[in-house]
Image (cartoon, coloured by chain):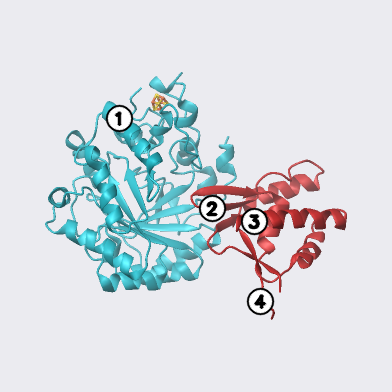
Chain colours: A red, B cyan
Amino acid sequence: MNKLQRNPDIVWRVEKRRQQAVLERMAAGEEGGDEGTVILLISGMMHQLNLLGGMIWTLCDGQRDIEQLVTELQKEFDVDPTILQADVQEFVADLVERGWLSYDQSTD
Amino acid sequence: MTNPLTEQFSAPLTFNWTLSYSCNFACSHCYSREEQCAELTLAELKQIVDRLARHQVPFINFGGGEPLIHKDLFALSDYARQQGLNVSMNSNGWLLDKQAAEQIKACGFRSVGISIDSADGALHDDFRNRPGSFDRAVNALDELAAAGVRSTMSSVISRINYQNFNDLLDLAREHQVAQVYLHNFKCSGRGFKNRQELDLTPEEWKDFYLEALKVKEETRDLLISFDDPVIASLPGYKENSLVKGSSCGKLSLHLRPNGDMTPCGFIPLVVGNILQDDFEEVWYNSPVLNKMRNKEAKGKCQGCGAYEDCLGGCTARAFATTGDLSEPDPHCWK
Ligand code: SF4
């Protein structure tokens, strides 16, 4: 219930090399979290998601609700859980409004 | 140095895949009638799909040659869908009957493009050197619609249709076509040989694009697409394309029947073989691809205010006519 699911019509891809470079820069204490690491192709337009957005997107496979997303992301990002929770909620709400993500309302 | 925009792409978004150069037609503008190439077995073709899936290439588009005469087309498409790829093709429509449309639907094709050069059937047949080809192409559109497959229409703009392109749009509407591609004329293969007869002058190209862009802006019921980078030099042009200049080698690559990769079907420079070479090595380090991604302004492009957006126009056309990837596009009206 309330599991997050990507819109199946959206074609997307993790830009692995770019993601790797961003992770390395962040590990070295440099900036870089805003560069696109996941691309989405929607109606001939390309959109990019940054590292956190890209990870959220990748995790929205219909198996996790917001709480579970935050738990997973907490393993990757060393930030205050309350801030992370708020960031995730804001991002997810935006993508749900755009129709790129949806909640699976089934009860099983 | 690599173009920063290209650097973010870990692989092309599309592979335009020629399974065979065989065709049941001999059209006046075709780039591939004189091509010959060894072909691969289904097992090898599936290996290519595995590689593309591994590199997360989202789209493959079969062209050719006529894809529908290839005996493994459906088996391969089915396999590609199972591996998560989005499959489409371009066909002349001759063989696309009800049964083929149903197979296309069952294989999960994302869309199928049918080539139609003129809304005047006799002119189309003459251009394609095949009586009856117009009727069968139009019938193919209807069969696709009946089977619930998204259809597109591909028209190469040339002297035979540039003044009547609105008729092509009407024809598309009548047959439930979702999108019309008004392709630029490439000057390769037969298109090069018949260039004098078929190609427009630069001034005619300019007038055509100004008119066609106006129509596109006013059209709501049909998607109209162009693939000519030189239109970015038109004043007020504001389409947001994914990359500047030609997309070949940046967003797409072409596969020949033997697995050789070229930047596009119209540039016969082999950059590697998908089955034999390390794909990432080719994609990131091929001198030809990097040259196309980092063109230098030459000739009249030097100092041209549009260079930043146009990047010298169509690289394939420049190469076909001058042998140099960075020369200005011969269609340029500046
Ligand atoms: S001169 Fe070169 S850059 Fe300028 S519009 Fe022509 S092809 Fe494009």
* Cα distance in 3D space between marks 3 and 2: 17 Å
Q: Residue furthest top?
A: B303
As rendered, which of B143 and A16 lies closer to the eye? B143
Amino acid bearing label 2: Leu
- The lab-note entry on whether marks 4 and 1 share a chain reads no
Amino acid bearing label 3: Glu
Does residue B13 show up?
yes
| Residue located beneath label 3 in the image | A97
Residue B146 shown left or right of residue B26 in the figure? right
* Cα distance in 3D space between marks 4 and 1: 56 Å
Residue A106: mark: 4
- Specify the quadrant that holds the N terminus of chain B: top right
| Residue located beneath label 2 in the image | A41
- Judged by depth in the image, the label closer to the viewer, 1 or 3, is 3
- The x, y position of residue B125, in whole percent, is 14, 52
Q: State the image quarter where residue B298 is shown.
A: top left
Q: State the image quarter where residue B315 is shown.
A: top left
